[in-house]
Image (cartoon, rainbow, N blue to C red):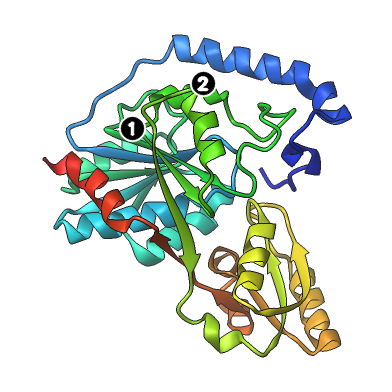
Amino acid sequence: MKVLKPKFWDQNYFTFFSILLYPFSIIYKFIFFIIKLFVTEKKFSVPIISVGNIYLGGTGKTPISLKICKILKEFEQNPVVIRKYYKNHEDEISLIKKHNKILTAKKRWDAINLAIEKNFNFIVLDDGYQDLSIKKDLNIICFHSKQKTGNGQVIPAGPLRESLDTLINCQIVLINGFKDLEFEQKLKRYNPKLIFFYYNYFSKGIENLKNKKLIAFAGIGNPINFFDFLRENHLNLVKEISYPDHYAYSEKDLEDLNKLEEKFKAKLITTEKDHLRMNSFVRKRFDYIKVEVKFEDEQGFKNSIKKLLE
C-alpha cells in the first residue's frame, strides 16, 4: 500500500483520529481471529526462519533477512529468501536479488516447494510472520527503537498489523537502535521467553559524502529513520523529502528533484531500495547509501541461528 503513515500512529497517547478509527480496528482484529480458526499449519522438510514485524513497515526486515543468509553461508548452508509476490514490492525483490538468491510466488507454499526442488536447504521467509499456514522453526520480529509500537493500536487506529499478544509465537526480537529495557519488559508481558538483540546500520562508503551539501529523499516505511541515519553520521542535509512506501517515481518527480539539486547546489542521495525503483538509465544520475547490519552481540545472534543446525 503506497501511503504515508499518519503522524497520530506514532503518538504515545490516544488522539481524536485513533479514537475515531478504533471501532474499525476491532473489526480488523475480529476478521484476523476468524481467519486463524480456519488455517492449518504445514511443516516443511527444510528449516524455516521467518523475519517479520508487527509494526507496519520500516522495521528493517529485508536487511536482516540478508544478514541471516550471510550467516548461514558462513555455516556452509545454502539459503534462499522467500517472499510472497506483490507487484508494488518489486523494489525489495530487486534489492534481495542483488545480494542473495530469492524465490517469489503468489503463495509462499509454492515458493518453498520450489526451493526444496532446487536443493536449497534453508528458507529465510522475508515478511512471513502473519502467514499462519507455514510452520516456522524460528520466528524473528523486528522493531525500531524510535517508533517501537507507535500508539499501540491495530490498524487503522494505529500502526500494528496485529495485537502484541501474538508475540507468544515469537522467539527473538531484534531492535534497531539503542538499548531499551523498559520496552523489553513491555514486550515480555506478552512472552517472557523473548530473547532480545540490538543492531545498527553502517555504510562503508559514507565517508565520501562528508563535507558535501546533500538533499536526501526516500520512499520507504519510515523515511525519517534514513534521514536520522545520515545526520548521525554527521552529513550535511540541507533538505529532506519523504514519499510513500514503495513509491514509483515518475519522470516529473525526478525532474523536480534535479531542479532542487540545482537550486540548493547540493547532491541528491537516497536509499538503495529507492535507487532500484528507478529505471537503469535514470538511476545513474542519483547516488544511494548502501547499509549493512551490525549487531551489538554478533556472536550471540549467530549462536541462536546455529542452534537450528544442531
Instruction: Give the left or right position of residue 66, taking residue 219 as reference.
Output: left
Nearer to me, 250 or 238: 238
Relative horizontal placement of residue 298, taking residue 273 as reference (left or right)? left
Q: Nearer the viewer, residue 163 or 242?
A: 163
Residue 62 in picture, x, y percent from top left: 45, 53
Dot 1 crowding, Cα within 10 Å, few <14, some 14–19, many 20+ = some
Q: Quadrant of the C terminus?
A: top left
Sooner in the amino-acid sequence: mark 2 or mark 1: 1
- Left or right: 30, with 53 as reference point: right
Total marks shown come to: 2
Which label belongs to residue 165? Answer: 2
Q: Which residue is mark 1?
A: 109
Q: Residue at x 62, y 70 (%)?
A: 232
Q: Residue furthest left?
A: 310
Q: Which image quadrant: the N terminus?
A: top right
| Residue at the spot 28% in from the left edge and 22% down from the top edge | 42
Q: For numbered disc 1, what is the local secondary structure?
A: helix
**Residue 174 lies in what quarter of the image?**
top left
What type is the residue that disc 2 sits on?
Answer: Asp
> Spatial distance from mark 2 to mark 1, Cα to Cα?
26 Å
